[in-house]
Image: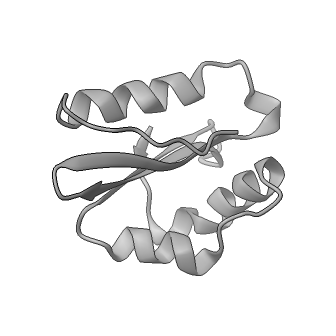
Amino acid sequence: MRGMTEADLPGVLAVETACFTSPWTTGMFRAELLYPFSWQRVAVDEQEEVIAFIVARHYGDVWHVMDLAVAPLHHKSGLGGRLLDEFLVRTPVDMAVVLEVC
């Protein structure tokens, strides 16, 4: 797992599209990468292909998980939980979590 970059967006969009009927757009993900109070991570396979991701945003004193998805071939692998665990470790304990999960 590592921080999401602009180069990851095609893979992130592939996972997003496979998981949701109303997927986020490239522009929405790009905006999160530029937003100073946004936190994004990707999980990649051995070939550095994106297989899961998480996007969270800080509003005032509250963090929101905006989007969390795992590629269908990797469902039940624990990747979503690992991404969420990393988020919880890196953010304050007092928070609200809103999930859009696949």
* Number of on-image labels: 0
Question: Residue 11: image x %, image y %?
Answer: 67, 58
Closest to the observer, 28 or 78: 28
- Residue at image coords 47%, 43%: 98
Residue 3 falls left or right of residue 59: right
Above or below residue 90? Residue 59 is: below
Above or below residue 31? Residue 67 is: above
In the image, farthest residue toward the bottom: 27
- Residue at image coords 38%, 48%: 64
- Residue at image coords 72%, 63%: 23
Closest to the observer, 1 or 71: 71
Residue 61 falls left or right of residue 11: left
Question: Residue 75: image x %, image y %?
Answer: 75, 26
Image quarter of the N terminus: top left
Question: Residue 66: image x %, image y %?
Answer: 48, 52
- Residue at image coords 62%, 76%: 26
Image quarter of the C terminus: top right
Closest to the observer, 80 or 5: 80
